[in-house]
Image: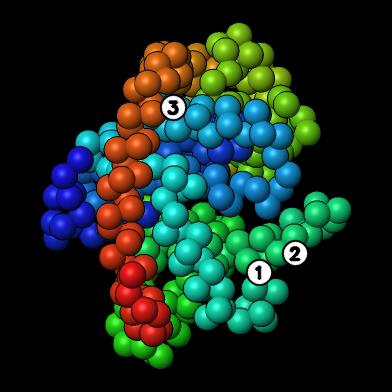
Amino acid sequence: MSEAPVTEKKKVIFSAIQPSGTITLGNYLGALQNWVKLQDEYNCIFAVADLHAITVRQEPQHFRRNILEAYALLLACGIDTEKSPFFIQSHVHTHAELAWILNCYTQFGELSRMTQFKDKSQKHADNVNAGLFTYPSLMAADILLYQADLVPVGVDQKQHLELARNIAERFNGIYGNTFRVPDPYIAQVGAKIMSLQDPTRKMSKSDENVNAWVAVLDKPDIIMKKFKRAVTDSEAKICVGEGKDGINNLIGIMSAVTGKTSDEITADFEGKGYGDFKVAVAEAVIEKLRPIQERFDEYIANKDYLTEQYRKSAEFALRISQRTLDKAMKKIGYLAK
């Protein structure tokens, strides 16, 4: 991989995803689909954030499989390593090194105000570890190492990006210009996919009701079953409206996977019932996911190819990030190696 993609004048975007074991339809339509599109307009750098994942206890064999499957699935979704380095975070040692340095330029009070720390501390009360607390400093290191101009963020990550900006500005204020201060990237059209069982809440794999969410790798019969069970309303009219959260969500999903507007969808299904519409949405989702699932099966069966891709990208990421780390360490006063 040449260094041309990051030396051109295009802006740099950095984004990472944890290897949680399951990527939902909501993750794909709301974020990953946009990652693929961004590759033509920006210098994108992507990672599987496996260092972040161990704030929660992991079973080693299961964890290794999740990392590899997450990598294969994102390739299947359309990440092109010839355009965008896509690496596994733990394979690039500069992330952990800069994270320690940034810990020392992050205030305890700033970290204690992070809402995700409060939420996860309650959820995992038996394992409130230091990594869970300093997680945002590692996230800042991820971003600042690549001098990212933009970071795609959801609502739950805005606070972390703001902290990364504060850390960069604080460090630059002490030592002079070292880190580029990143801005949030707000997608022009971001599909917000809600739970199929409680459409007032975002679709999430952590939902205990498995019928509430669709995984990108769900088999067609499972997808059909989940959509047939989707919560709707008693009006039996397919249109966008207040108090019609379930139908609004299904129309939004149909729009996201077909490219049709909500008005076009409403016209297509005028006079038809909710049962027909649920089946049609399920069929559209199945067709949207089919090529991704087929590519995933090919990639996951070819471990040598996956290894080649993530090693090549990690070497590239290390060259880029080492420059930033060396610059920061020199400004602090560390001796050169």
For badge 2, the amino acid type reads Lys
Whichever of callouts 3 and 2 sits on the residue coming sooner in the sequence is 3
Label 2, label 1: how far apart the Cα atoms are: 7 Å
Residue at the location (48% across, 64% down)? 97
Location of mark 1 (residue): 114
**Is residue 31 visible in the rendered structure shown here?**
no
User: Residue 251 location in percent, x, y?
Assistant: 51, 31
For badge 1, the amino acid type reads Met
User: Residue 94 location in percent, x, y?
Assistant: 42, 59
**Is residue 175 visible in the rendered structure shown here?**
yes
Residue at the location (66% across, 79% down)? 108
User: Residue 120 location in percent, x, y?
Assistant: 74, 56
Relative to the observer, which residue lies in front, 131 or 152? 131
Check disc 1 and report its element: helix, strand or loop: loop
In the picture shown, does residue 220 fall above or below 337?
Answer: above
Location of mark 3 (residue): 72
Indicate the quadrant containing the N terminus: top left, top right, bottom left or bottom right: top left
Check disc 3 and report its element: helix, strand or loop: helix
For badge 3, the amino acid type reads Ala
In the picture shown, does residue 83 fall above or below 3?
Answer: above
- Report if the CB atoms under discs 2 and 1 are less than 8 Å apart: yes
